[in-house]
Amino acid sequence: MKIKGLVLLIFILMMLVIAGFIGTQNGHIVLVNYLLAETQVKMSTVLVSAFLLGFGACFTGGIYFYFRMKWKITALTRKNKKLSQQVIDK
């Protein structure tokens, strides 16, 4: 990893830690209206759950894209080997 990327990663992690400390001090109660019921929860809990849901969705999409590309690369490598064997045999 390059130094620029490492510095950026450390900066982002520091911002998340600072945001976490500030978020734990937020004790406001909010009314959350679900489809079937209403409930009162702390604002920090709502923010954490929204962040985790977004992170989970992005992580799942990223893993799906990564494996789709890996499978495509594997298929193209096999096809390339087969075609190069046909050229060599002729």
Image: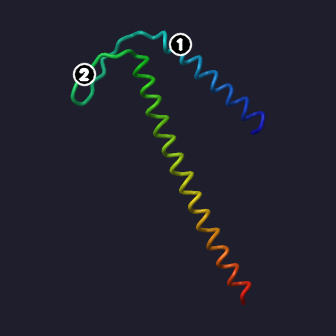
Q: Secondary structure at mark 1?
A: helix
Residue shown at 62%/71% (left/top)? Answer: 78
Residue at the limit of the structure toward the bottom, as seen here: 90
The residue nearer to you, when weighing 88 against 8, is 88
**Dot placed on the residue nearer the N-terminal end, 2 or 1:** 1
Quarter the N terminus occupies? top right
Question: Residue 42: x percent and y percent?
Answer: 38, 15
Quarter the C terminus occupies? bottom right
Question: Residue 10: x percent and y percent?
Answer: 68, 26
Give the vertical position of 88 relative to 19 (above or below): below
The residue beneath circle 2 is 38
Could you say which quadrant of the image residue 50 lies in?
Answer: top left
The residue beneath circle 1 is 22
Residue at the limit of the structure toward the left, as seen here: 36
Image mark count: 2
How packed mark 1 is, by other alpha carbons closer than 10 Å (few <14, some 14-19, many 20 or more), is: few
